[in-house]
């Protein structure tokens, strides 16, 4: 090995490194910097893509309307591709390099948890758009989240079962992160509703046939209803197999499939399926005195007009994250992180797309299980049943 | 084995110099954070290069060994309350045993069967980490305790006082990662210059010829496979303690491919080359923040272009260029480049 060439090579790399990472220095102190790291590409892009679109759209709108505290918003966003280690690095970059005032992200529980210690350390408010309860329990001073926890979805479904007098159920769930966490949460709270899980089956995220699992559930003595916790195409296959097998028991799905895509995939087999979902799926069916109605209708209209694609529940999480942050900055009257954090923690009756938020120092999610609407598929459309 | 002194390794002082210069030029916590991860991954790749560049065997499961080290440390320290050092050693021992068990029958064969075996092994490990949620935290990942030794804790969130100097946790970790990288290179270079290294190069050149002159080829291939798996495991453990949170994504096939790409890009068989390969590839996501959707495509493109235009890799090709244009340069012989 040539000593000189090695030296040159190393020097070149170091210079490149310096140039590459230096980037543009933070601009004038004027704008309020909102930092976002989402999974806009990769396996979790169905979460990150609508989230990013929503953030971009509303930052534009807020700026057109004069900004916040008379200052424009500046959205700095990175795409972690669903990778926790990249999410960690981008969160670090947003906190230390871009020096954002509020951190929004990540899209998944893994990407969120990788960034949590950094936000806590940097003492910057962070609002996650991921589901798991572990993000806000135990409560971390600087970390908030907008979606309901999986446990709430389970509670919502179980309370409806209880109301129908169902006491013995079969549980079927996916083995991906969502299904796994949902299964655990369901098993944890099921007894509070006087319900017993008599059959517990799982399927892989790539499986194309769940007939054997469903047959086993059907053959279990005394099953009165079936609950499927999963997302992606798995639940649609479960629904179709369920109809093919002619199982004549109520079928419940989770909020993981609360999108029009599920109706397309499951077809007529979905008739009668019940699931907990965001009000966003049935904006027009909401009663007129529902405080969420105008918010949900407005978001759906604006999103579909701007992006020419149907709105998704996940984009709603980003809507809430951004608007909670803006609301907190307005309440705080400054971008002092501690003041924003205090304001976030004391938000009351804030009407968002996902639900009505009532934050407390003990509850950094601020939603009730009732924020899930219970829907039933009737004539190939969503119908509100409560 | 006779251990070489730095004087026989012209690259080592340069590496140390660069490592010392980085915190001076880039005195910023964010840069150092990235540099620390680069050093740990580079050390992993130096180990992988022993296998790919010298034994001529490709492992498509190195990310899984890395992840086993990471998860081993995370689980033993987190769930079972071990201290980090025994946890790290235990994880490395486990990985070594596994590599030995897989490598022993496979490496008796000629050809590239090891790639197939490690591909399968890697996927199995990734599935196990994903599915055994009670142990590994499942797809959502698992938090990892900070590194500590005899009650002394090294966390990026703390500050340390040494001879009246205040050193941030990030700086301290960078120093540790730098030392680990230098150690990794030093051990690798000594292996390469030992009889083992010479035997391996003979195997790489012609396995039949090597056997004919009495080299126990399968023994040496197995030895180096286990060593490179242990490299990955140990660096995985440090990586886990450093980042504080790990997910099954570490074990994926894509991550294995990323590691192999670093070796090919930097130059198979060139210890310093693969370090540059690791640094460049880890810079990509930070450079291409606006083109993230094309990142996988860029990886493929880089791999293709390297194979076509620089089949020997970045550093060997560049140094050959330099030698051609400045023939008076100081030369040292030997295949390490």
Image (cartoon, coloured by chain):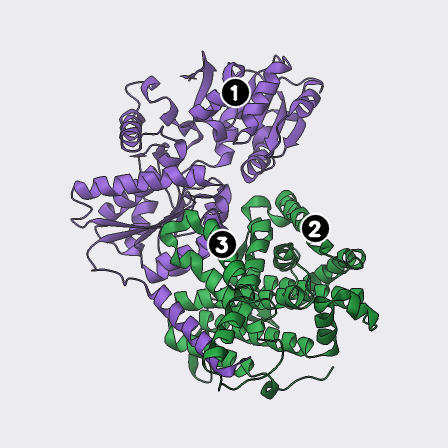
Chain colours: A purple, B green
Callouts 3 and 2 close, C-beta under 8 Å? no
Q: CA distance from mark 1 to mark 3?
A: 37 Å
For mark 1, what is the residue? Answer: A266
Quote the CA–CA distance across marks 1 and 2: 38 Å
**Residue linked to disc 2:** B116
Q: Are marks 1 and 3 in contact (CB under 8 Å)?
A: no
Which residue is depicted at the point 35% across and 29% down? A309
In this rendering, the count of numbered labels is 3
A283 and B158: which is toward the camera: A283
Residue B86 vs residue B317: left or right?
A: right
Element type at marker 1?
helix
Q: Going by the image, does B290 lie left or right of B187?
A: left
Q: Position of residue A382 (x, y in %)?
A: 42, 18
Indicate the quadrant where residue A164 lies: top right
Chain letter of mark 3 equals B
Q: Residues within 10 Å of mark 3 (few under 14, many from 20)?
A: some
Q: Position of residue B297 (x, y in %)?
A: 47, 49
Spatial separation of the CA atoms under disc 3 and disc 2: 21 Å
Q: Position of residue A357 (x, y in %)?
A: 35, 36
Sequence order check: which comes first, mark 3 or mark 2?
Answer: 2
In the rendered structure, the answer to whether residue B229 lies left or right of residue B254 reads right
Residue A280 is tagged as none
Q: Quadrant of residue B230?
A: bottom right
Name the subunit of mark 1: A
Residue B312 vertical placement versus A237 (above, below): below
Instruction: Please give the chain letter of the residue carrying mark 2.
Output: B
**Tag 3, which secondary structure?**
helix
Mark carried by residue B299: 3
**x, y (%) of residue B18?**
46, 78
Do marks 3 and 2 both belong to one polypeptide chain? yes
């Amino acid at each position: 090995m040539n000593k000189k060439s090695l030296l040159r090579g190393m020097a070149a790399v170091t210079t490149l490194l310096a140039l590459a990472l230096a980037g543009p220095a933070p601009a004038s102190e004027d704008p309020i910097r909102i930092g976002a790291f989402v999974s806009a590409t990769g396996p979790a892009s169905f979460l990150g893509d609508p989230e990013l679109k929503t953030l971009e759209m509303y930052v534009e709108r807020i700026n057109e309307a004069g900004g916040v505290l008379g200052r424009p918003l500046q959205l700095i966003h990175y795409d972690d591709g669903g990778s926790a280690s990249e999410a960690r690095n981008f969160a670090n970059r947003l906190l230390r390099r871009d020096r954002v005032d509020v951190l929004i992200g990540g899209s998944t529980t893994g990407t969120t948890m990788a960034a949590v210690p950094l936000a806590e350390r940097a003492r910057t408010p962070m609002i996650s758009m991921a589901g798991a309860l572990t993000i806000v329990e135990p409560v971390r001073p600087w970390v908030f989240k907008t979606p309901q926890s999986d446990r709430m979805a389970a509670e919502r479904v179980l309370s409806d079962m209880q109301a129908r007098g169902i006491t013995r159920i079969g549980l079927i769930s996916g083995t991906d992160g969502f299904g796994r966490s949902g299964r655990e949460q369901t098993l944890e709270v099921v007894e509070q509703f006087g319900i017993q899980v008599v059959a517990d089956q799982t399927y892989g995220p790539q499986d194309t046939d769940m007939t054997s699992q469903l047959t086993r559930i059907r053959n279990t003595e005394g099953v009165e209803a079936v609950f499927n916790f999963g997302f992606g195409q798995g639940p649609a296959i479960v629904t179709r197999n369920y109809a093919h097998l002619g199982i004549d028991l109520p079928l419940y799905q989770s909020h993981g499939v609360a999108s029009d895509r599920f109706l397309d995939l499951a077809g007529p087999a979905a008739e009668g399926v019940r699931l907990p979902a965001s009000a966003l799926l049935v904006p027009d069916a909401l009663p007129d005195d529902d405080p969420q109605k105008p918010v949900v209708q407005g978001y759906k209209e604006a999103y579909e007009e701007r992006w020419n694609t149907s709105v998704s529940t996940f984009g709603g999480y980003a809507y809430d994250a951004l608007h909670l942050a803006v609301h907190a900055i307005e309440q705080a009257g400054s971008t002092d992180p501690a003041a924003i954090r205090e304001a976030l923690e004391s938000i009351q009756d804030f009407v968002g797309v996902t639900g009505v938020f009532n934050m407390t120092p003990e509850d950094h999610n601020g939603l009730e299980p009732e924020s899930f609407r219970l829907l039933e598929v009737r004539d190939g459309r969503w119908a509100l049943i409560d | 084995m006779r251990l070489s002194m730095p004087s026989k390794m012209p690259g080592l002082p340069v590496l140390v110099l660069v490592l010392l210069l980085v915190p001076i030029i880039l005195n910023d916590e964010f840069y150092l954070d990235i540099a620390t991860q680069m050093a740990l991954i580079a050390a992993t790749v130096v180990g992988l290069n022993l296998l790919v560049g010298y034994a001529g065997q490709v492992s498509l499961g190195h990310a899984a060994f890395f992840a086993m080290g990471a998860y081993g440390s995370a689980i033993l320290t987190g769930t079972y309350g071990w201290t980090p050092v025994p946890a790290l050693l235990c994880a490395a021992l486990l990985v070594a045993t596994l590599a030995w068990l897989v490598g022993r029958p496979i490496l008796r064969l000629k050809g590239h069967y090891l790639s197939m075996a490690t591909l399968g092994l890697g996927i199995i490990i990734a599935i196990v980490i994903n599915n055994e949620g009670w142990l590994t935290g499942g797809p959502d990942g698992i938090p990892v305790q900070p590194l500590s030794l005899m009650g002394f804790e090294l966390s990026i969130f703390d500050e340390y006082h040494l001879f009246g100097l205040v050193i941030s946790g990030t700086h301290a970790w960078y120093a540790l990662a730098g030392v680990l990288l230098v150690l990794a290179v030093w051990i690798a270079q000594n292996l390469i210059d030992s009889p083992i290294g010479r035997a391996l190069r003979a195997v790489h050149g012609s396995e039949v010829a090597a056997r004919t002159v009495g080299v126990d080829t399968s023994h040496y291939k197995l030895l180096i496979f286990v060593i490179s798996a242990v490299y990955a495991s140990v660096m995985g453990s440090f990586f886990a303690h450093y980042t504080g949170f790990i997910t099954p994504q570490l074990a994926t096939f894509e991550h294995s491919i990323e590691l192999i790409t670093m070796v090919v890009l930097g130059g198979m068989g060139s210890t310093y080359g693969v370090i540059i390969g690791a640094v460049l590839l880890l810079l990509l996501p930070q450079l291409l923040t606006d083109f993230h959707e094309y990142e996988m495509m860029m990886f493929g493109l880089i791999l293709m272009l390297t194979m076509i235009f620089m089949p020997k890799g970045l550093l060997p090709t560049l140094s050959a260029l330099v030698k051609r244009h400045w023939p008076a340069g100081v030369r040292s012989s030997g295949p390490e480049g």
